[in-house]
Image: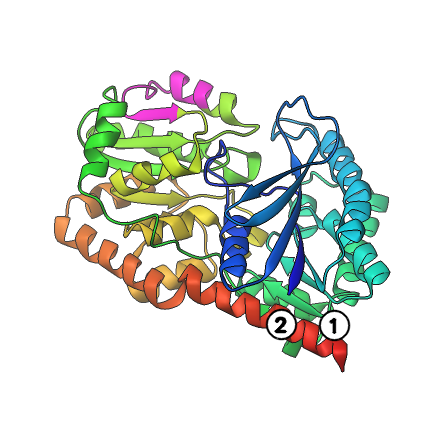
């Protein structure tokens, strides 16, 4: 089966950033299962290339279009990048031909080339909802214009209407798609997942991490690895670090990533007197290097601002932490909080920094509890979030969509 896979922000493990490599991991497994996969994506950094160029990544034919994009760009600039890519990707997808179009958001504008290619090639389209568009930008106030809100909601319905099947990354996202009127029996929940071949427990990982960052020193490591944007609210962790100094200065907070709030977060750490004391912030690094950081951590965090819509998220860092066999600490409710409470794989932090600091200090003071939570995290990863199992489910969805189109 020849699959045209559309994802504007595709990453490989060797690329800079702590962001999701879900599409890479799913695509390479589809290749392993015997399918021909063509990834249509954008090249976001500087390059001498002016138009489409192609590389092969573990058997995936990756078609790159240079379209600058960074988290520090204004919302208007991001919208421009979305539509430039959408228009050019539509033509590219049609030129590739194929038996099915598989499109994954964000951004929601990926539906434009997906539907166009599906109609022109007369093949089915499967749409994957992996982020909360347009719900999230509306909730945080990034999308305020009434006309743009209306257009975004219409685009969402347009994507569902033209999809043979829909893949949702969380229960909340599944319910959101169903509430639009889309047939529930054609919605499939395939969450973010865990890569055991990469996050293999390694006693030397901590030594490598300490050697690379001697300034941190020994202690307990609380890790945040991901985007530092407004919705991620990493300033919360800075305030928790401040409160932790009073309780246990050996609890070290390590933040790795980039985003629009990187400088603001760093500035607050300096102001509160925790920067380079018990709070250490670093720019993004390749995903392959992030693995050692996760394996060296005592606790992995996933954070979001107090926005109810974010409780439906399927944050990649949460699943990387599970795969690494580390206790997970989150500061939001929803289905991930329920998982942690049910399995004992971590803890749900209070939004008050002082209370959260006490929770972490008490948790880390009990080695038995830390070890048990780590084992529960790895068990949860293996039983419910294996990338291999979920990739097989995705293959089944794509095959079923092709079969549906032949009836």
- What residue would you read off at disc 1? 181
Measuring 34% from the left and 25% from the top, which residue is drawn there? 280
Residue 179 lies in the magenta-colored region: no
The answer to whether residue 217 is above or below residue 53 is above
Find residue 398 and report its horizontal and vertical position in percent.
Answer: 63, 68
In which quadrant is the N terminus drawn? Answer: bottom right
Q: What stretch is highlighted in magenta?
A: 266-281
Vertical order, 181 against 51 (above or below)? below
Q: Where residue 100 appears, x then y in whole percent?
A: 70, 63
User: Where in the figure is residue 335, as x and y percent of width and height?
Assistant: 46, 62
Determine whether, in the image, residue 282 is placed left or right of residue 161.
left
Q: Residue 354: tell me if it is visible.
A: no
Residue 15: assigned label: none
For label 2, the crowd category at 10 Å Cα-Cα, with few meaning under 14, some 14 to 19 and many 20 or more, is some
Q: Which residue lies furthest to the bottom in this view?
A: 407
Q: Give SS at disc 1.
A: loop
Q: Which residue is drawn at 62% across and 41% down?
A: 9
**Pointer 1 local density, CA inside 10 Å: few below 14, some 14–19, many at least 20:** few
> Which residue is at a point 41% across and 62% down the rendered structure image?
385
In the rendered image, which residue does mark 2 sit on?
399
| Residue 235 falls in image quadrant | top left
Pointer 2 or 1: first along the chain: 1
For this rendering, which residue is in front, 223 or 384?
384
């Amino acid at each position: 089966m020849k699959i045209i896979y559309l994802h504007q922000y595709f990453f490989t493990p060797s690329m800079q950033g702590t962001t999701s490599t879900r599409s890479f991991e799913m695509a390479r497994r589809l290749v392993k299962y015997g399918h021909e996969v063509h990834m249509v994506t954008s090249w976001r950094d500087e390059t001498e290339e002016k138009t489409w160029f192609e590389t092969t990544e573990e058997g995936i034919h990756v078609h790159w279009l240079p379209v600058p994009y960074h988290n520090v760009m204004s919302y208007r600039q991001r919208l421009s990048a979305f539509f430039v890519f959408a228009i050019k990707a539509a033509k590219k997808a049609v030129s590739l031909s194929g038996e099915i179009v598989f499109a994954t958001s964000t951004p929601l504008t990926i539906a434009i080339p997906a539907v166009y290619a599906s109609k022109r090639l007369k093949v089915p389209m499967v749409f994957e909802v992996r982020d909360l568009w347009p719900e999230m930008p509306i909730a945080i106030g990034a999308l305020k214009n009434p006309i743009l809100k209306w257009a975004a909601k219409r685009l969402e319905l347009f994507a569902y209407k033209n999809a043979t099947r829909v893949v949702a990354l969380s229960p909340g996202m599944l319910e959101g798609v169903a509430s639009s009127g889309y047939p529930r029996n054609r919605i499939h929940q395939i969450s973010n997942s865990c890569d055991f071949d990469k996050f293999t427990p390694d006693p030397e990982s901590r030594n490598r991490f300490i050697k690379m960052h001697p300034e941190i020193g020994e202690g307990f490591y609380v890790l945040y690895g991901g985007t530092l944007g407004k919705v991620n609210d990493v300033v919360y962790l800075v305030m928790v670090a401040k409160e932790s100094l009073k309780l246990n200065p050996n609890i070290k907070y390590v933040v790795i990533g980039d985003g629009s709030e990187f400088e603001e977060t760093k500035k607050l750490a300096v102001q509160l007197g925790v920067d380079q004391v018990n709070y250490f912030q670093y720019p993004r690094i390749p995903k392959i290097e992030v693995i050692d950081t996760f394996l060296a951590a005592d606790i992995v965090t996933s954070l979001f601002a107090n926005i109810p819509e974010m409780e439906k998220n399927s944050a990649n860092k949460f699943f990387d932490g599970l795969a690494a066999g580390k206790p997970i600490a989150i500061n939001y409710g929803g289905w991930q909080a329920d998982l942690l409470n049910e399995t004992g794989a971590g803890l749900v932090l209070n939004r008050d920094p002082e209370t959260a600091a006490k929770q972490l200090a008490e948790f880390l003071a009990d080695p038995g509890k830390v070890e048990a939570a780590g084992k529960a995290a790895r068990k949860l990863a293996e039983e419910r979030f294996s990338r291999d199992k979920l990739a097989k489910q995705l293959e089944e969805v794509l095959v079923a969509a092709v079969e549906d189109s032949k009836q």
